[in-house]
Amino acid sequence: MTWFDESRLDDEAALTGVEARLRWLAESGARVRRETALAADALAQAIARTRESGRPRAIVAAGADSRLLRAVLEPFCPVPFVAWPSPGLPGWAGPLDLVVVLAPGGADPGEAMAAGEAARRGCRLVVAAPEGSLVAESAGGRDSSLLPVSSGDQLAIAVVMLSFLAQVGLGPELGTRPQAADEVAAALDEVAVARSPYRDLSVNPGKILAISLADSMPVVWGGSVLAARAARRVAESLRRASGRSALAGEAEDLLPVLEAARPRDVFDDPFAEPNGSPRPALVILDDPSTDPFHLDQRRRLTEAADARGVRVEVIASEAGSQVARYASLLLQGTYAAAYLRLGLVE
């Protein structure tokens, strides 16, 4: 039987056991700065080469977090954009198209295949990968550019690639200002400071959220495209941390889960639920939006939760750019998952 011991969240010995994981989360902002600095010279060369070549017919993004690039670029990109997580490339990709590959580890055969195929077809190719890696070596070609990276952090590497795409006129916000990557890093630093393991349970939002979700089935929703992607990543982290269900999706998919919850009765045993199934808890990733559709979805979800006594938790970010808000929302949810895992004991 598994239960949640919240005293472990402030226990020095218990925290030592997850020190490596918490340090990795705390260094998220530093990795963004480090990768941006490491790739600065190569980034300038890639930008100059792409500007000389003119606007591509289409963009194909391959590798880890290619869907993050799509989520950022699709509403603004002036040319068709395709996220291609499968090995290789779509059959139509050719010399008129730009292929970008995100390869944090540089050893994935599928990413190497995509880079090699792009080079053989004569596509314009920009690869973010460690120097000397399998993917970097596969990407060699006349129209290829390598952005060297080293951290293995998907988000930090995506920030480097987004900076490139923005500065060649193919993406919004990030990269159009010199301090844009620093803005993402600063948002991550702010989350890490507020959720430091050395901050007491009573003032640590990461620990408080973990306690709130400890006896629940998280139902995670984000309104904007990026918030929805962050919701899926957060739900995945919560599933890995707890070994229990955690759902993320569109409001239409999540509403039946909330509506199926039995209304809470003041006389109920708070630790009992029919068939032993945990009650849902609605987690809203609040990426500020004035879109009437998103506002209506949020209203319907919160009304359904309130009608059945379902707990509602809100994760918010006030960062300036959409990528910085995505990074902040994702890291906040990941911290909660780390503390949830710490508190669960057999």
Image (cartoon, helix red, strand yellow):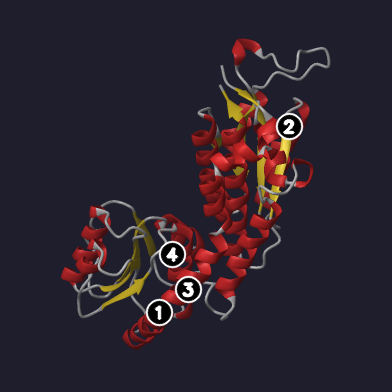
Viewer-nearest of discs 3 and 1:
3
Secondary structure under tag 4 reads: helix
Q: Earlier in the sequence, mark 4 or mark 3?
A: 3
**Residue 301 versus residue 20: which sits nearer the camera?**
20
Instruction: Using residue 325 as the reference point, say whether residue 244 is left or right of it.
Output: left
Viewer-nearest of discs 2 and 1:
1
- Marks 4 and 3 close (CB-CB < 8 Å): no
Residue 333: tell me if it is visible.
yes
Q: Which residue is mark 3?
A: 36
Q: Amino acid at mark 1?
A: Leu
Q: Residue at x 39, y 64 (%)?
A: 81
Q: Residue at x 44, y 74 (%)?
A: 165
Answer above or below: position of 175 versus 263.
Answer: below
Q: Amino acid at mark 3?
A: Thr
- Distance (Cα) linking label 3 and label 1: 9 Å
- Distance (Cα) linking label 2 and label 1: 46 Å
Q: Amino acid at mark 2?
A: Arg
Q: Which residue is mark 4?
A: 157
Q: Which residue is mark 1?
A: 43
The residue carrying pointer 2 sits among few (fewer than 14), some (14 to 19) or many (20 or more) residues within 10 Å by Cα, namely some
- Distance (Cα) linking label 2 and label 4: 36 Å
Q: Which residue is mark 2?
A: 311
User: Quadrant location of residue 47?
Assistant: bottom left
- Marks 2 and 1 close (CB-CB < 8 Å): no
**Residue 30 versus residue 317: which sits nearer the camera?**
30
Residue 77: tell me if it is visible.
no
